[in-house]
Image (spheres, helix red, strand yellow):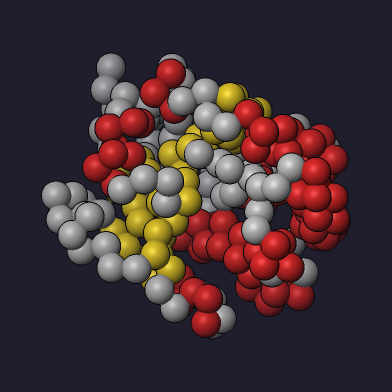
Amino acid sequence: MKLLLKYFPNLTEDQIEKFTLLESLYQDWNLKINVVSRKDIDELYLRHVLHSLGIAKVIEFKDGSHILDVGTGGGFPGIPLAIMFPECSFHLVDSIAKKLKVVNEVVEGLGLTNVKTTHSRVEEIKENYDFIVSRAVAAMPTFVHWVKGKIAKEQKHELKNGIIYLKGGDLEEELKDYKTTTIYNLSDYFEEDFYETKKVVHLPLKYRG
């Protein structure tokens, strides 16, 4: 929690309570259904929670926004973002049912009312969203193909509706066909070594009616 408060000093009491509770919920459920590696569970705030909140350094989602988390796995980045932005709606999707079982239990344990989950491939989701977030579940061209036609028409933010992707390493080759991407280095926001090569990529996508 010290790590989170270092970078997000204005958290409310409710947010602090929920972020604190996260660790015991994940430790408990991870023993039953392994969704986070042993090493990562010991560094949950550094490797998962703060990493997810890297998106919150790039954009402050406005109240009423709808965000889709694709391939959420154990609930990242969706759950930390749902705590951070309680007036936004988050839809967490994964094709692996056992991972969503943990997500559902954590959501219930935290009392989050702004999260829904779906066991599905993202291509089968029919709704539209302001932003689609994810943590490196596929190369960008594949990901763009998956989420085509899921972007809302109305723009609520200065950052254009589209994909906000947590990625690492050299992205030059992967992003060469996308001239409108903006890359934010998380090392500009977080000083820990873990974030040296971590990035947030924003790719605007057009609404397709």
In the image shown, does 83 or 34 lie closer to the viewer? 34
Q: Is residue 23 visible?
A: yes
198 left or right, relative to 112: left
88 left or right, relative to 197: right
Q: Quadrant of the N terminus?
A: bottom right
Residue 191 position in % (x across, y down): 54, 82
In the image shown, does 180 or 146 lie closer to the viewer? 146
- Residue shown at 59% from the left, 24% from the top: 118
Residue 64 position in % (x across, y down): 58, 34
Residue 58 position in % (x across, y down): 46, 60
Quarter of the figure with residue 115: top right
Work out whether 87 lies above or below 77. above
In the image shown, does 71 or 186 lie closer to the viewer? 71
Q: Quadrant of the C terminus?
A: top left
Q: Is residue 53 visible?
A: no
Work out whether 48 lies above or below 73. below
Residue 21 position in % (x across, y down): 84, 54
- Residue shown at 20% from the left, 63% from the top: 172
158 left or right, relative to 78: left
- Residue shown at 34% from the left, 31% from the top: 146
Work out whether 35 lies above or below 4. above
